[in-house]
Image (spheres, grey):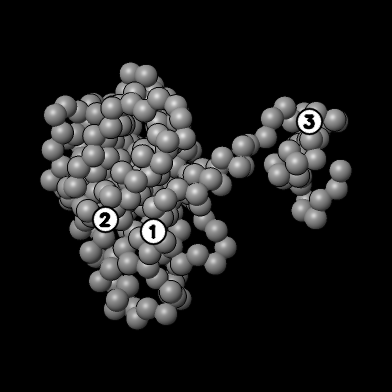
């Protein structure tokens, strides 16, 4: 089997029934040895694409968290789906909530300051329910993260924060400076308040923006800021694509 790419994609492997009619072996070269692995399964690219592009409500202007990244973030929380409540306080169109439900979470909570975002979330969750499968209890509310009120603390927060207005790479430096200051205030207020809505020791997995401009890279959320609010940052992961003006820095942090 050959491909135009350096590696065989899941689409090539699946559409050519390579796993049924043959096999794919992967060689991983290290300084000490060559590891040999055999592919046993590939991702269900059709299902991923359907949840990304087939859902009824998508808002490119406010940013769209890819379902795969949302799934990774839920996994990074380490929360037990059966016994944990997951909160997304910037739920947007509900991508994190959808992936948490598909992973078997029995209780999820979503909130957003935007009424349109909440309408999008409801539409997408109704669409997901129509695909079949059990739907757990879902709590949704229109509320700023800074003033969100819950009946009891949650076990995990998984969210992508508000990333600011869409950028085109031609913004004036003064605009970028004001944007950074506004987002920094939002994050300080929101995650200071959210620290009181989780159980001690709970994990938060949060995607913050990193801006690329002519003057260099600028990040808004910092380890020092978050740790001053009661969060212990354990890991930071970068998610980026070539040509993007806004990249994502994923913080994995624990409430002290």
Which label number is shown at residue 116?
Answer: 2
Look at the numbered disc 3 and give the secondary structure of its residue. Answer: helix
Mark positioned earlier in the residue sequence (2 or 1): 1
Please tell me which residue is depicted at 81% across the width and 35% down the height of the picture: 18
Q: In which quarter of the image is the N terminus?
A: top right
Q: How many callouts does the rendering have?
A: 3
The residue at the point 25 percent across, 71 percent down is 178
Q: In this view, does 27 lie to the left or right of 142?
A: right
Q: With 130 as the anchor, is 193 left or right in this view?
A: left
Q: Which mark is residue 19?
A: 3
- The residue tagged 1 is 59
Q: Distance between the residues labelled 1 and 3?
A: 37 Å
Q: Which of the image's four quarters has the C terminus?
A: top left
Tell me the CA gap for discs 2 and 3: 44 Å
Q: Nearer the viewer, residue 101 or 197?
A: 101
Does residue 98 appear left or right of residue 256 in this picture? right
Q: Where is residue 116 in the image (x, y as percent from the top left)?
A: 26, 55
């Amino acid at each position: 089997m050959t491909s135009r790419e350096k590696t065989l994609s899941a689409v090539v492997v699946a559409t050519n029934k390579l796993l049924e009619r043959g096999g794919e072996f992967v060689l991983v070269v290290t300084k000490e040895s060559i590891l040999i692995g055999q592919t046993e399964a590939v991702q269900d690219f059709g299902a991923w694409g359907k949840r990304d592009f087939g859902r009824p409500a998508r808002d490119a202007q406010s940013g769209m968290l890819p379902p795969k990244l949302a799934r990774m973030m839920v996994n990074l929380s380490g929360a037990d789906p059966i016994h944990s409540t997951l909160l997304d306080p910037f739920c947007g169109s509900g991508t994190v909530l959808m992936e948490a439900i598909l992973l078997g979470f029995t209780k999820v909570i979503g909130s957003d300051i935007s009424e349109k975002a909440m309408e999008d979330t409801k539409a997408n969750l109704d669409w997901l329910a129509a695909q079949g499968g059990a739907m757990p209890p879902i709590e949704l509310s229109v509320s700023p993260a800074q003033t969100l009120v819950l009946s009891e603390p949650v076990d995990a927060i998984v969210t992508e924060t508000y990333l600011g207005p869409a950028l085109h790479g031609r913004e004036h430096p003064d605009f970028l400076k004001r944007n950074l200051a506004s987002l920094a205030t939002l994050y300080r207020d929101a995650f200071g308040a959210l620290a009181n809505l989780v159980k001690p020791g709970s994990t938060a997995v949060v995607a913050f923006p990193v801006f690329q401009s002519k003057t260099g890279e600028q990040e808004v959320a910092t380890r020092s800021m978050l740790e001053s609010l009661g969060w212990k940052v354990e890991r930071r992961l970068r998610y980026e694509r070539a040509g993007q003006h806004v990249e994502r820095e994923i913080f994995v942090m624990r409430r002290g």
